[in-house]
Image: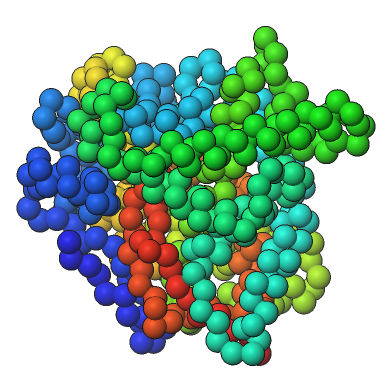
């Protein structure tokens, strides 16, 4: 698969980050399976980046790939009841997350969403800002050696550690039954073993058919299930022995939902596993890609540093940073566009459906047809974006946002199943970037090699190495 250049823009003004070049020749069935095993992002052809929708067939499966914002809105919002999670998606995610919020459906999903909604309401989420700031500042000790000279780091791994520490402090009061050391490696192994598309998934083979890509997955899954069980037992003892002193956090709130009208103990465990195993992963990946793109666009990075320095000089409360740092937020949102953490949204039509575009074009969707909405192609679509493959954070500055259709940009999904932690993630990202970039500068290193691969999230293959130096 051909690649785009990874060299920084000489003027430091714009940068086209590395990504698969769209195919010009349709792949054979064997090549489809090989590419899905290697990296699904390399599968898509020119049509996926230039047409509003495409009907395709693989073996007996029919799929419509949807890039039209109006049709996306219809599927995810206006007629959402007619679209369930696709069989492929269930085969990939349910072995990991079972009935967690990302994979549950029907009444189980409604109960979980209702139980967690108060914790992630914007007003409540803003209350986490001080904890996010504290954990980000403590994390800076990792880069102390950069004050004496350039320090090379795997920024993808580091951001996994940082976002895990923030999640642990904000939602679990620091009481997750595992150590931070080695956690990034454990997450990497979990996603490598369990979070990739297996050719057997594409062929819709029954769940009992072995998935060779997931050999060794049971061992790492058992480790994470043990973390969940131990974490729940620790908190259960605190609630029993010292109910007044137990933290009133996400973990306590979730465990108090157990009962006939709430969640079962298994559903609570599945949701805890979802947040520990995947709840911070999307933000971690997006932060790493943001710092990488900024290392290639020093002119925009200079603007960010000036904005960050100005706000911090005023000692503004961190809860205000998301609104007071539009340049910083725009860089993060542009990285979310180019490297969406969740690169695909998979649905299947329950009953036959019909949509008519404003121009009168009719789209027929038969019962059972897979519906594939891919932020990966949608965010790089030639009909929707100027210079779609170029890192241009200016698109997301306040004066330009109105040009972006709500349903052409889906880093957190849309409709009833929109990511419950979207506000939390945006606030966390801006605070983390501000703290990191106020003290340190992140540049390319001789080891920097960036290439996106699709696992559960859009990850940099082999990590993402940057050089850290102390800012003057």
Residue in view at x 24 percent, y 60 percent: 20
- Residue 199 coordinates in the image, percent (x, y): 22, 38
Q: Nearer the viewer, residue 290 or 257?
A: 257
Q: Horizontally, is 77 left or right of 353 in the view?
A: right
Is 339 above or below relative to 229? below
Q: Nearer the viewer, residue 437 or 284?
A: 284
Q: How is the image coloured?
A: rainbow
Is 227 above or below relative to 130? above
Q: Nearer the viewer, residue 357 or 129?
A: 129
Asked if one can make out residue 404 in the rendered structure from this viewpoint, the answer is no
- Residue 216 coordinates in the image, percent (x, y): 39, 42
Residue in view at x 66 percent, y 25 percent: 115
- Residue 134 coordinates in the image, percent (x, y): 76, 61
Question: Quadrant of residue 12 in the image?
Answer: bottom left
Is 310 above or below relative to 271? below
Q: Horizontally, is 317 left or right of 215 in the view?
A: right
**Picture quarter with the N terminus:** bottom left
**Picture quarter with the C terminus:** bottom right
Residue in view at x 26 percent, y 27 percent: 209
Counting every numbered tag in the picture gives 0
Asked if one can make out residue 468 in the rendered structure from this viewpoint, the answer is yes
Residue reaching furthest to the top: 260
- Residue 264 coordinates in the image, percent (x, y): 63, 17
């Amino acid at each position: 698969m051909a690649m785009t250049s990874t060299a920084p823009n000489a003027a430091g003004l714009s940068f086209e980050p590395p990504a698969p070049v769209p195919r010009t020749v349709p792949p054979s069935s064997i090549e489809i399976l090989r590419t899905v095993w290697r990296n699904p992002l390399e599968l898509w052809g020119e049509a996926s980046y230039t047409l509003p929708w495409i009907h395709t067939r693989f073996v007996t499966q029919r799929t419509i790939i949807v890039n039209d914002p109006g049709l996306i809105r219809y599927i995810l919002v206006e007629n959402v009841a007619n679209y369930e999670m696709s069989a492929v998606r269930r085969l990939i995610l349910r072995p990991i997350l079972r009935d967690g919020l990302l994979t549950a459906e029907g009444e189980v999903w409604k109960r979980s969403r209702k139980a967690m909604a108060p914790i992630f309401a914007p007003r409540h989420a803003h209350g986490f800002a001080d904890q996010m700031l504290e954990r980000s500042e403590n994390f800076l000790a990792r880069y102390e050696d950069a004050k004496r000279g350039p320090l090379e780091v795997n920024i993808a791994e580091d951001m996994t550690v940082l976002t895990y520490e923030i999640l642990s402090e904000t939602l679990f009061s620091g009481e997750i039954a595992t150590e931070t050391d080695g956690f990034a490696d454990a997450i990497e192994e979990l996603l490598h073993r369990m979070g990739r598309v297996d050719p057997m998934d594409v062929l819709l083979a029954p769940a009992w058919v072995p998935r060779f890509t997931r050999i060794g997955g049971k061992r790492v899954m058992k480790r994470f299930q043990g973390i969940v069980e131990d974490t729940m037992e620790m908190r259960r003892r605190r609630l029993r022995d010292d109910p007044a002193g137990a933290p009133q956090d996400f973990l306590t709130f979730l465990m108090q939902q157990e009962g006939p009208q709430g969640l079962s103990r298994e559903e609570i465990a599945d949701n805890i596993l979802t947040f520990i195993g995947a709840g911070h992963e999307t933000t971690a990946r997006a932060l790493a890609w943001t710092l990488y793109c900024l290392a290639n666009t020093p002119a925009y990075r200079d603007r960010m540093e000036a904005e960050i320095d100005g706000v911090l000089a005023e000692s503004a409360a961190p809860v205000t940073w998301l609104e007071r740092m539009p340049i910083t937020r725009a860089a993060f949102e542009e990285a979310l566009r180019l490297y969406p953490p969740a690169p695909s949204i998979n649905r299947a039509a329950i009953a036959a459906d019909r949509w008519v575009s404003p121009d009168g074009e009719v789209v027929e969707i038969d019962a059972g047809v897979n519906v594939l909405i891919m932020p990966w192609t949608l965010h790089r679509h030639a009909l929707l974006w100027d210079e779609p493959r170029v890192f241009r954070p200016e698109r997301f500055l306040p004066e330009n946002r109105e040009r972006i259709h709500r349903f052409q940009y889906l880093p957190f999904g849309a409709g009833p199943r929109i990511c419950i932690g979207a506000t939390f993630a945006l606030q966390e990202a801006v605070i983390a970037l501000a703290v990191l970039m106020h003290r340190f500068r992140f540049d390319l290193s001789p080891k920097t090699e960036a290439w996106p691969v699709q696992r559960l999230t859009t990850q940099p293959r082999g990590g993402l190495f940057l050089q850290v130096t102390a800012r003057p």
